[in-house]
Image (cartoon, rainbow, N blue to C red):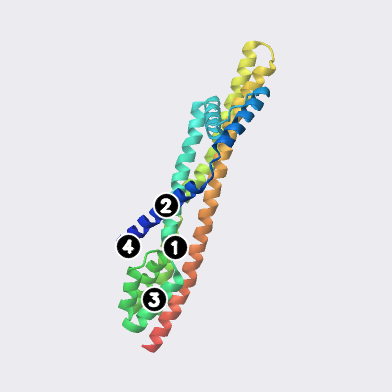
Amino acid sequence: MKKLFAIVAVFAILGLGASQYVMAQEEPDTSAVEETTETAVEETVAEVPVEEAPAPSAGGGELHKQIKAKFIEGGAQFMGAVLLTLIFGLSLAIERIIYLNLATTNTEKLLNNVEAALEEGGIEAAKEVCRNTRGPVASIFYQGLDRYEEGIEMAEKSVIAYGSVQMGLLEKNLSWISLFIAIAPMLGFMGTVIGMISAFDQIQIAGNVSASLVAGGIKIALITTVSGLIVAVILQIFYNYILSTIDGIVNSMEDSSISLIDMLVKYNVKK
């Protein structure tokens, strides 16, 4: 099949080249007309004064330079601390997002597979299905099926208890993300306060209030506040997305757990 595709591609390229060659041969010779037109255009352009066009500005490079300049103006100590909160917060948020995406399970398909395994092979077959399925829902199902021999009530208690364990695993490291969300603006405000103190010290040394002196100090002080607020907003968006994903997984866990208990009750009656 690959050889057939290669042969077809070669013939297509040869055919395209031949068609272009034929079209080039059929085009009329307009070189004389083009030379006359170019000469006239050059004479017209020579008579018109040419204004120099402004050089195109590199948007990405200018933005990078501006961010770097503001970072240096804000001070390496507090701006570096704010940057570290962004790095650590984003790393934890990305880790949680990857974990939650891997933990998401098609519960309807899992319930159908478990029910089919119960009817065909019993509890052991259903446990095998849960072992071969990733995610917290499958782990909860496995714990409930593993305690089925001790009674329906024990299986239900096991499902509830292990559901709490899985919920704790889903919410892991969220407290650290919320901590970085709170710390980032605090560091910005601290840098602002220290910058204002530095500005007043300069005013005291100068002996008079200079507008340029006060404006420069206040601008540098406010850069850290803006940076801290930006970092907090970015992390807050990721934090809310993670919370909404966890809520969806938890609701799915609760609904599927109820369905599993009902399924075990029906299986016990049939048995």
Q: Secondary structure at mark 2?
A: helix
Q: Quadrant of the image for the N terminus?
A: bottom left
Q: Secondary structure at mark 1?
A: loop
Side of 227 relative to 169 (left or right): right
Which is nearer the N-term, disc 1 or disc 2? 2
Tag 1 or tag 4, which sits nearer the N-term?
A: 4
Distance CA(mark 1)–CA(mark 3): 17 Å
Query: Around disc 3, counting alpha carbons within 10 Å, would you say few (fewer than 14), some (14 to 19), or many (20 or more)?
Result: some
- Residue mark closest to the camera, 2 vs 3: 2
Look at the numbered disc 3 and give the secondary structure of its residue.
helix
Identify the disc placed on residue 104. Answer: 1
Per the image, the residue denoted by label 3 is: 113
Q: Which residue is mark 2?
A: 18
Tell me the residue at 31%/81% (across/down).
Answer: 121
Q: In whole angstroms, how far apart are the C-alphas of marks 1 and 2?
A: 55 Å
The residue labelled by disc 4 is 4
Decide if residue 253 is on the left or right side of residue 52: left
**x then y, percent, for residue 165:** 41, 62
Q: Name the image quarter holding residue 195.
A: top right
Residues marked 4 and 1 touching at CB (< 8 Å):
no
- Please say if the residues under marks 2 and 4 sit with CB atoms less than 8 Å apart: no
Q: Residue at x 33, y 58 (%)?
A: 6
* Viewer-nearest of discs 2 and 4: 2
Query: What amino acid is at disc 2?
Result: Ala
Left or right of 179 in this view: 162: left
Q: CA distance from mark 4 to mark 1?
A: 42 Å
Number of labelled discs?
4
Dot 2 or dot 3, earlier in sequence: 2
The answer to whether residue 231 is above or below residue 79 is below
**CA neighbours of label 4 inside 10 A, class few (<14), some (14 to 19), many (20+):** few
